[in-house]
Image (cartoon, rainbow, N blue to C red):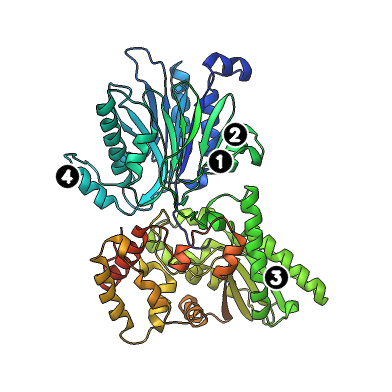
């Protein structure tokens, strides 16, 4: 993806179901659990660059010793630093990180602090093991404000109103109520149900009590991903299936998706069960997981990304006027590569049928070292185009049309300031930028860093095209909608986009993306929403393209984002 886009975190939960001597004898190590959870985190490190954490619970701690070990890091390379910290403790203490329940987390911050206090796992400490709670998750809620107010009204003091702190407080509040009713803890299902049924947003919550009641709970719409694997030795949960497959060498069919609204419960004795926790809701799994976020070494994601490339071919051939002989096809590294393979397969089939050939290669190469060097925002402005190197001699100057594939176009800054200027140096007659995703029209509030309209190039292009007075009328209506309960609101932004035909909007986006001095012609090709659904049929969470939000809070966020735009407030809308 050309635009850097922050997104969902990664979680890993591991419960060892045998005693320590079993693993030491079979695997010849006393650190089996730590090694496996560290590997699962490493295989998901694409899901966190801002922080990492690992907790290990001991089910039978001796008096005078903590029942859990915890390390967190916000170092420049947090996962490497975390593993190094834990390894040092392993070498110094024969019991450190050698418990039965492991809870790991990788943090990709969208908003909020970047210090240790924002790092998972979060802890609610207590000398009573059934009141102690460790929590890590992949979540964004739209109703944090309302939840905070409800907790405050019931007498709670919240030192933080960030999502993680509020979720932890809601869970511990439900835990305390359940304990006070029955005198002890009778399982986590009613606690999870009482707390999470009030959450509006996307979440996968993983945690454990001090007694060893461990859990993983997925939101009712299945927005955030979660997978699990259970055998006689382990029970495992992770945000991505290949992480589990790599750590435990299991085939795809043995690693299952955690069903939306269900909780995987692991009892202190090691028994495992799935329980319904949340009322059923339409499945709206995030499609950006398939386009970009999750690694493509998942067999299903790999196939879907290739299908996305196939689906773009008719539009690209039309944009070329059928002239494949004067086309050179490439992609923006690195995550568009698998989609490019699908695009290339389908183009080669068209060319073979028509007696043509297809010339292709990698013309853009991301200079990772240089990108690190220009971390300063002001320096980036002048040097941004040199983030990418180009391969000279592949494109025939003055006669070729250069087709480049990208995952999606969100803000458009990198495309305008870096990619297009450097591609123009190759001297193509025309440049076609193809996006494997539709235009990003709406803000996201479920984990992706797209919370303000001012950042979206498609919305700015829409403003260029709107008839006079339309924006002011929509602003007034959005303010009226925000006075209603979230469940009764309608998405005012959708009525604005309905005023401009999609081809007109795409032309306006192209004008916005065209850098000053570009010599080549420029055409944009976007995936259609219909083809996206056909390519990713089980992941219909496409609200950033369609405005069809899965929860009432999403609609409210869209309306608030419009109000914030009109009132020149660049704050997030939730």
Report if the CB atoms under discs 1 and 3 are less than 8 Å apart. no
> Circle 2 sits in a helix, a strand or a loop, which is it?
helix
Label 3 and label 2: CA atoms lie apart by 43 Å
Percent x, y for residue 463? 38, 79
The disc, 3 or 2, on the residue closer to the chain's N-terminal end is: 2
> Circle 4 sits in a helix, a strand or a loop, which is it?
helix
Callout 4: 10 Å neighbours few (<14), some, many (20+)?
A: few
Percent x, y for residue 183? 27, 23
Q: Residue at x 30, y 61 (%)?
A: 486
The disc, 4 or 2, on the residue closer to the chain's N-terminal end is: 4
Number of numbered markers: 4
Label 4 and label 1: CA atoms lie apart by 42 Å
What residue did someone put label 4 on? 153
What residue did someone put label 3 on? 393
Q: Residue at x 53, y 33 (%)?
A: 236
What residue did someone put label 2 on? 247
Which-is-in-front pick, marks 3 and 2? 2
Label 2 and label 1: CA atoms lie apart by 8 Å
The disc, 1 or 3, on the residue closer to the chain's N-terminal end is: 1
Label 4 and label 3: CA atoms lie apart by 68 Å
Which-is-in-front pick, marks 4 and 2? 4
> Circle 1 sits in a helix, a strand or a loop, which is it?
loop
The disc, 4 or 1, on the residue closer to the chain's N-terminal end is: 1
Report if the CB atoms under discs 2 and 1 are less than 8 Å apart. yes
Name the residue nearer the viewer: 456 or 167: 167
Label 4 and label 2: CA atoms lie apart by 45 Å
Viewer can see residue 436:
no
Q: Which quadrant, please, contains the C terminus?
A: bottom left
Q: Is residue 460 above or below residue 469?
A: above
């Amino acid at each position: 993806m050309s635009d850097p886009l922050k997104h969902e975190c990664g979680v890993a939960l591991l419960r060892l179901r045998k005693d320590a001597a079993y693993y030491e004898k079979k695997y010849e190590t006393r650190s089996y659990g730590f090694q496996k959870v560290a590997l699962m985190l490493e295989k998901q490190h694409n899901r966190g660059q801002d922080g990492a954490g690992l907790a290990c619970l001991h089910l039978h701690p001796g008096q005078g010793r903590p029942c859990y070990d915890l390390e967190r890091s916000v170092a420049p390379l947090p996962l490497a630093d975390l593993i190094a910290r834990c390894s040092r403790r392993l070498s110094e203490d024969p019991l450190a990180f050698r418990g039965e329940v492991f809870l790991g987390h990788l943090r990709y911050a969208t908003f909020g602090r970047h210090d240790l206090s924002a790092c998972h796992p979060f802890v609610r400490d207590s000398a009573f093991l059934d009141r102690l709670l460790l929590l890590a998750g992949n979540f964004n809620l739209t109703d944090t404000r309302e939840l905070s107010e409800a907790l405050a009204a019931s007498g709670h003091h919240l030192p933080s109103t960030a999502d993680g702190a509020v979720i932890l407080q809601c869970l511990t509040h439900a835990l305390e109520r359940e304990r006070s009713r029955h005198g002890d803890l009778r399982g986590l299902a009613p606690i999870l149900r009482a707390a999470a049924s009030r959450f509006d947003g996307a979440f996968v919550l993983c945690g454990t009590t001090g007694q060893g009641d461990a859990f993983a709970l997925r939101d009712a719409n299945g927005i955030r991903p979660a997978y699990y694997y259970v055998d006689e030795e382990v029970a495992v949960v992770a945000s991505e299936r290949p992480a589990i497959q790599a750590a435990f060498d299991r085939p795809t069919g043995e690693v299952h998706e955690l069903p939306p609204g269900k909780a995987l419960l692991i009892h202190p004795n090691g028994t495992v069960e799935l329980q319904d926790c949340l009322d059923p809701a339409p499945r709206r799994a995030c499609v950006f997981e398939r386009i970009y976020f999750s690694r493509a070494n998942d067999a299903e994601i790999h196939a879907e990304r290739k299908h996305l490339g196939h689906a773009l071919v008719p539009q690209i051939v039309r944009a070329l006027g059928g002239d494949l002989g004067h086309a050179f096809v490439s992609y923006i590294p690195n995550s568009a590569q698998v989609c490019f393979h699908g695009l290339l397969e389908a183009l080669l089939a068209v060319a073979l049928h028509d007696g043509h050939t297809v010339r292709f290669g990698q013309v853009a190469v991301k200079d990772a070292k240089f990108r690190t060097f220009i971390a300063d925002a002001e320096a980036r402005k002048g040097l941004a185009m040199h983030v990418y190197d180009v391969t000279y001699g592949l494109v025939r100057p003055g006669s070729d049309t250069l087709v480049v594939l990208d995952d999606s176009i969100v803000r458009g800054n990198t495309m305008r300031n870096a990619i297009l200027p450097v591609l123009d140096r190759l001297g193509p007659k025309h440049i076609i930028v193809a996006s494997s995703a539709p235009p990003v029209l709406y803000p996201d509030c479920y984990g992706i860093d797209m919370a303000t309209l001012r950042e979206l190039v498609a919305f700015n292009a829409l403003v260029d095209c709107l008839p006079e007075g339309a924006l002011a009328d929509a602003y007034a209506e959005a303010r009226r909608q925000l006075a209603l309960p979230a469940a009764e609101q309608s998405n005012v932004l959708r009525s604005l986009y309905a005023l401009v035909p999609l081809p007109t909007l795409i032309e306006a986006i192209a004008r916005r993306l065209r850098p000053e001095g570009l010599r080549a012609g420029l055409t944009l090709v976007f995936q259609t929403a219909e083809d996206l659904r056909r390519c990713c049929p089980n992941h219909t969470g496409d609200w950033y393209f369609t405005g069809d939000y899965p929860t009432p809070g999403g609609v409210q966020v869209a309306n608030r984002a419009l109000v914030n735009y009109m009132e020149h407030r660049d704050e997030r809308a939730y």
